[in-house]
Structures are given as structure tokens and as C-alpha cells.
Amino acid sequence: MLHFPAWKIAVVAVVCALGILFALPNVLPKDSLDGLPDWLPHKQISLGLDLRGGSYVLLEVESETILEEWQESIEGDFRAMLRDERIGVRSQGWGNQRLTMMLREAADLDAARLAVQEYDNDILINFDDDGTILVELTEQGINERISNATEQAIEILTRRLNEFGVSEPIIQRQGLDRIIIQLPGISDSSIIDPDTVAKLTFRMVDTDTPLSQALAGDIPAGSELLEEHRTQEQKDAGVPVQYYVVRKRVMVSGEHLTDAQPSFDQGRPVVSFRFDSAGGRRFCDTTTENVGLPMAIVLDDEVISAPRINSPICQGAGIITGNFSPEETNDLAVLLRAGALPAPLLILEERTVGPNMGADQVRAGEMAAVIGLVAVIVFMVFSYGLFGIFANVALVANIILIGGALSTLQATLTLPGIAGIVLTIGMAVDANVLIFERIREEVANGRTPFNAVDAGYKRALTTIIDANVTTFIAAALLYTLGDGPIKGFGVTLAIGILTSLFTSIMVTRLFAVLWLRRRRPQALPL
């Protein structure tokens, strides 16, 4: 253990130097960071909401919309399957999450059973002898779709915030259908805009139904009446609403978009878009089959525009025109790139955390860390003399390495994270205490200083590794299974364990080896 080749000394020196280099931005003002060369680290430790202040929003996925869309999908699929088998349906409708379909001919019941028998397992299908088909949603199916929608909403919100340039947002799931969003350093949470689903569809305008008929309430089953999109300025100016009768069938959906960018067409702000291969084929087929007819571009149940198809569009790309300002085209492009939310989100709680509260907590955490550090330093010096000083230097190196690791990984530091660092300060010298006590035992057994130090490090190493591995497993579980503050505590504790192992085993041993080689003492100052 006392054999310390030059390459090991170089590794210890490089790791400590890198730790200092990556931790240094945290003690420099942000103005000074801008003046540093590009090749130097610029990242500072990211502070969480409880330390930095910002916005906190609790959202809930509107599960009714998810269930309604699922019900519409089931009803449409059943109608299509029965129609393919030329089975007539007399009436149908939903009630209490149950679809009731009455066949025109009860004799078609066996054929209907064969037609739908392999449909989704998340529903229950019952058949009555009088020609009635009952389709019931299962609790498992409902929960699965709500859960999937929540996960999808988290992914899309993350992409949206990243597109808008929000740094270090914290987005976490709570329960089946709730989402917590924390925006450190941002006091205005309106950037989340949960009301904007950004669901884009391309549908044909129903030219067979007169607008006056639709306004009177007589709308065919396969169509609906939608408003044209108006800007806020148009609404304030009292510009009248224009309506369109649009078919419900979606020809191409926004999920096939691969890119959307703000641009200009003949001096007008527009959004240019591009489809994937499947979307490009569908768009080409649709425009080819409907030349001369208007196609509605629908965003969140508002018609953005309804241009007439003059010729087939088979390039897999196009533009969205409308009453847009340049800023609106940019926001729309961002939303389309991020994707559509599976359902609207309801704001259950919204609050702003002031930076003063965070500053007080930071000062309290800093004071606790300083007091703990001083207490540990004094204890080690009084207990182990020169070797205690070696351990204290390693402890300072450990703290610097933690700061450098947090800065590099951009892990969010929260108040429990500070608690993890304070705990690490106390735990960091445990390994050295075990080693030094073992060395004392070896000296008491009559070993020479060199042999005692060598045996102390060898025999204590297994115990040190076992103790730290078990603690690291606990920290990893806290990070993996925990949420919010628990994650912050787990990540700082895990980083502290790794750095303390390095400093206690490598740094203190380097100091001890160099001192022994230079002084060759007859007795150890322990």
C-alpha cells in the first residue's frame, strides 16, 4: 500500500486540479464568467426552487377528455368492423362508460361476435340474444390510458420548456394524473400555458353542408362547426367570428410532423412544416384526391386557415398561413415541434417562491456546513496530530470535488442536498479514522512506522469499501425512487461517498507516503 508510483501521483494531482477548475465558477460573479475563455468551465451549481426562488405549478391531466377520445375511437372502430361485414346497426350510444349498440338484425349476432372478438383487451364485450352489443371500459384500461397520457404530457412539457429556453426546469409526476413543475429563477409561470394543447389536424371542409344550416344546429353526424382562429388584437377590435363546417375525419394529424419553423411567404408570417414519410404519403394522397376542395388546418379546435387545394402536394412539406404576427408564428412553431398534449391540463395550484426565502436557507445551510467543517477539522487535529492534518486537507479536497461534480453534472442542489453535503463532511473522515486507529493498533503490536502504516491501510480497506458501498446503495435508491427533495439528498450523498472514498484512500495515503519517504521517522505522531 505504500508503493505509490508516479502515475498514481499524477492521477491524484489531475483529479484534484480538475475538481478545483470545475468548482471555481461557483465562487466567481456571473459577470466574470462571461470574460473567461471558452475552453474553461463556466457552469455553476444549479440551485433548486427552495434555494433560488421561482414558480411552482401543480397540474392535473383532464381525464374526461382522454376517456371521450377513447370512447369515440372504440365507437368508430366497432362501426367500421361491423360495416366491413355488412352488419347494420340500428342505434348506438354511450352511458356510464358503456357503449350500447343495437343490431338491425338479431340473426347477425354471431357474425358480429366474430368481427369484434379480437378487439382491445382493455374492454369487456357482452352480447345479448336480442341483438344488443354492450362494450364496457375496464378500470385497468382507464388507468393505463390516463397514466400513459400523464407520461406523454411530461415529455411534451419538457420539450416545450426546452424549446422556449427555460433552463433547469423540474418536472415530476405525482400520482396517476398529476404533474409538478418547478421553474427555479422564473417568477412568471404563464410560459407553461397548459390550456394550449397544440393538437394540429388536417381535415376536409364539408362543402355539402351549408353554413346557415350548421349555424341553425343541423349538423351531419360526421361533421362539426368550428370557429376561425382570431388574434387577441382582432378579438379586442371586435372582428366578427367566421365559422367553418369541417368533417371530423382526420386526414393527416400533427403527430407526423418532423419539423416546424417560422418563416415568411410573400411578406406574410407563416409556419413552414415537414412531414415524416408516412405523413407525407397521406398528405399527398389527400391532396391528390381532393383537388379543388378546401382543406381546413385545425389547431385546438380552431381553424387556422382553409386553403383550396389547387394541385397535389407530394413534397412532404407545406406552410400554415393565418392571421399571425411574427411572434405568434415563432410560438406556434415551438409548440408544433414539441408535439401536442394528449389532453388539456388543469392548474390545481400555482405559487411563487420568493428568492429571499431561498437566500435565508442557503445562509443557514452554509453556516451549518462551516460549523461542521470546523468541528471535524479541530477533532481530527487533536485526535491524530499530523495525520489528522492530512485528513483535513483531504476533506477540503473532498468538498471541492463535490462542488466540481455538481457543477459538471448540473445536478440541482436543494436544501436537502445541502443536508447531504453536511452529512458527507462528517462521514468523509470515517475512513481515515478507521485507518488511523488500525495503524495505532499495529504500532502497539510492535510494528515499525512503515509496516504499521502499510498494514493499517491494507486491513482497513475492506471495511471502508463495505461500509461505503452499502451507503451508496441507499443513496442510489433514494435518487431512483424518491421525488424532488429526496432526489436532491440522494444525489449529493452519492457524489459525496464517491469523492470521500477517493480522498480518504488516495489523497491521505499520498501525503502519508510522501512524509514517510522524506522523514523516515522512528515513531508515528499518532
Image: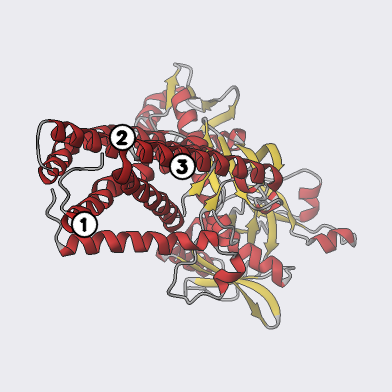
Q: Position of residue 80 (x, y in %)?
A: 46, 41
Q: Which mark is residue 373?
A: 3
Q: Is residue 413 left or right of residue 376?
A: right
Total number of numbered discs in the rendering: 3
Instruction: Identify the secondary structure beneath mark 1.
Output: helix
Q: Quadrant of residue 383?
A: top left
Q: Amino acid at mark 2?
A: Ile
In this view, 43 is above or below 492: below
Q: Which residue is depicted at the point 22% across and 54% down?
A: 515
Gap in Å between the C-alphas at discs 2 and 1? 34 Å
| Mark 1 or mark 3, whichever is nearer to me | 1
Q: Position of residue 363 (x, y in %)?
A: 61, 44
The residue labelled by disc 2 is: 473
Observer-nearest residue: 97 or 80?
97
The residue labelled by disc 1 is: 514
Q: Amino acid at mark 1?
A: Leu
Mark 1 or mark 3: name the one nearer the start of the chain: 3
Q: Are marks 2 and 1 in contact (CB under 8 Å)?
A: no
Q: Residues within 10 Å of mark 2 (few under 14, many from 20)?
A: few
Q: Quadrant of residue 457?
A: top left
Q: Amino acid at mark 3?
A: Leu
Q: Is residue 397 left or right of residue 464?
A: right
Gap in Å between the C-alphas at discs 1 and 3? 25 Å
Q: Are marks 1 and 3 in contact (CB under 8 Å)?
A: no
Instruction: Identify the secondary structure beneath mark 3.
Output: helix
In this view, 24 is above or below 374: below
| Mark 3 or mark 2, whichever is nearer to me | 3
Q: Quadrant of the C terminus?
A: top left
Observer-nearest residue: 75 or 315?
315
Q: Position of residue 409 (x, y in %)?
A: 42, 55
